[in-house]
Image (cartoon, rainbow, N blue to C red):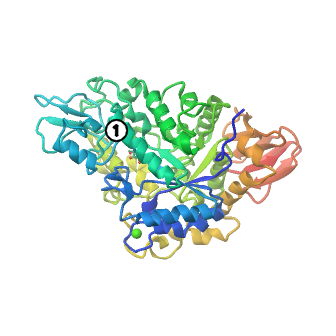
Amino acid sequence: MLTKKWWHEKVAYQIYPKSFYDTNGDGIGDLGGVISKLDYLKDLGVDIIWLSPIYCSPLADQGYDISDYYNIDPRFGTMEDMDKLLAEAKKRDMSIVMDLVVNHCSDEHEWFKKACEDPDGPYGKFFYIETVKDGKLPNNWRSYFGGPVWEKLPGHEDKYYLHVFHKKQPDLNWENPALRKEVYKMINWWLDKGLAGFRIDAIMNIKKPDIHACYPADREDGLCSIQNMLHDAKGIDEFLHEMRVETFDKYNAFTVGEVFTDRPDALKAFIGDDGHFSSMFDFSETVCGKNDDGWYKSQPVVCGDEYKKCAFDEQRRLGDIGFISNIIENHDEPRGVSHYIAEGEVNDTSKKMLAAVNMMLRGLPFIYQGQELGMTNVDFTSIDQIDDCSTLDEYQVALDAGLSPEEALRSVKPFSRDNARTPFQWDDSANAGFTTGTPWLSVNPNYKEINAADQVGRSDSVYAWYKQLTSLRKNPDYQEAVVYGELIPYLEEQKNLMAYFRKGQEKTLLVAANYQKQPQDMVLPSSYKKVLMNNCPALNQKGDVLHLDGYQVVILEL
Ligand code: GLC
Ligand code: CA
């Protein structure tokens, strides 16, 4: 049995502030924008808001490159705005969670500047700095965003620093206790302010194996995947345990880890009884169909049986170990409806089906901004429309592999992180009502059809469906089953049928989805008391057989 936690019953929502709502016309979303939309979120049923980074940053990786952990980037607002957001959220019984980005900082952070001035001094030891002879780099790891993980230390001909992400994101050296102490101090400073917790960025990277270890090259560039490093790094648990004890534990904070790992004991170590975090994201659907050679070889759409298998396998692995966080998208992924529904079949009915099968899984549901409207991927027509550094790298990888520019664009488009980063579609006015200025990234041209103003008051909208799902989670009659009920797959072998029970102490629900365009029949396990939700106008039944329409989903109380 799980020990109940304050956040288990909640609904979480990720805001990508830069693209959420702009209040001063500079084309960049801001904290004022978040504050002004709190009622919208409350009404949707959101309790916990995760803000992607708003700290001072040169925005080389959109804020995941922090130059000052203790201040708000002026483009996003001021510390007064942040305090106001915390207070306004509290008034509404909502909690704010920030991104904790401590695998690396920005090369414009004070620490790094001091390290450049004196690589052998105390701040030099905050980073991985190596002296390089005859131009031979210490290892051959390829950074996540392409190219070697080593970059020349400004002001020094023979010294290089390590960055597993962008070269403007130097890795922090967690082996150094002085660095760890600074990190904990910063975390506690924010928790003292009233922050409810953190989403913990790229955390698996904080532990490195021997940084002189080379691995066989796996591409023409002579470099090897960074996965080798992740696989070989041992001993991250000590760091994470220490961090938890020094910070989160003291505040009963909520933490959700961005944990990508092949460790078989990961669930227990990270979210078990004595785990490092409160929760971690289930990325099993996300990584399904991804190819190590690059996006150009990856599978653009994952659906039906594949989606079901990923979700059920993860739920089985999890059992009663802990509480996972479920997503269909985030700021690093394409839009869920475009990625998990076959091309040409994306419509309100299929969007609602995906929402239901995901949000009814056991765990904490996270909605990413715009997901509740069924926002879709963008039909980029030129690489110039893309800002994301990761997409630009993958485009180059595709070109290097011999694809033509058109083919390269076509192959990376379905995965671009910018699909999810276009401005939130508030209404059908210019720039989707996101800004009165010029948006930093173009709006998706489909904003006239897909926008909040149209959907909020319309009872058959995708938004209204999400609201029904959050209400079901909060309904005292069903909450125990929805939050804690055991998940038991039903008719798992039936093709493109995704059905499962949520067996609570008093009530048992059945979620049954026809994850395909063609209708299909499903034999009922028993009679049912009530149809709690149905994304189609009717429910056709003959005896004990339900005749489900294409992409129909129903939630039944048995
Ligand atoms: C995480 C973030 C991603 C960022 C990376 C480096 O994966 O979600 O957006 O680029 O870490 O901080
Ligand atoms: Ca602004």
Task: Determine whether the residue tagged by mark 1 lies in a helix, strand or loop.
Answer: helix
Question: Does residue 324 lie above or below 60 as drawn?
Answer: above
- Seen from the viewer's position, the closer of residues 105 and 246 is 246
Question: Does residue 516 lie above or below 289 as drawn?
Answer: below
Q: How many marks?
A: 1
User: Residue 442 at x, y = what percent?
Assistant: 39, 65
Lateral position of residue 175 relative to residue 235, left or right: left
**Where does the C terminus fall, quadrant-wise?**
top right
Return the residue at label 1.
179
Lateral position of residue 49 relative to residue 331, left or right: right
Question: Does residue 150 lie above or below 112 as drawn?
Answer: above
Q: Amino acid at mark 1?
A: Leu
Lateral position of residue 474 relative to residue 104, left or right: right
The picture quadrant where one finds residue 490 is top right
Residue at the spot x=35%, y=32% of the render? 226
- Seen from the viewer's position, the closer of residues 185 and 355 is 185
Q: How would you rate the neighbour count of disc 1 (Cα within 10 Å): few for under 14, some for 14-19, many for 20 or more?
A: some
User: Residue 113 at x, y = what percent?
Assistant: 22, 47
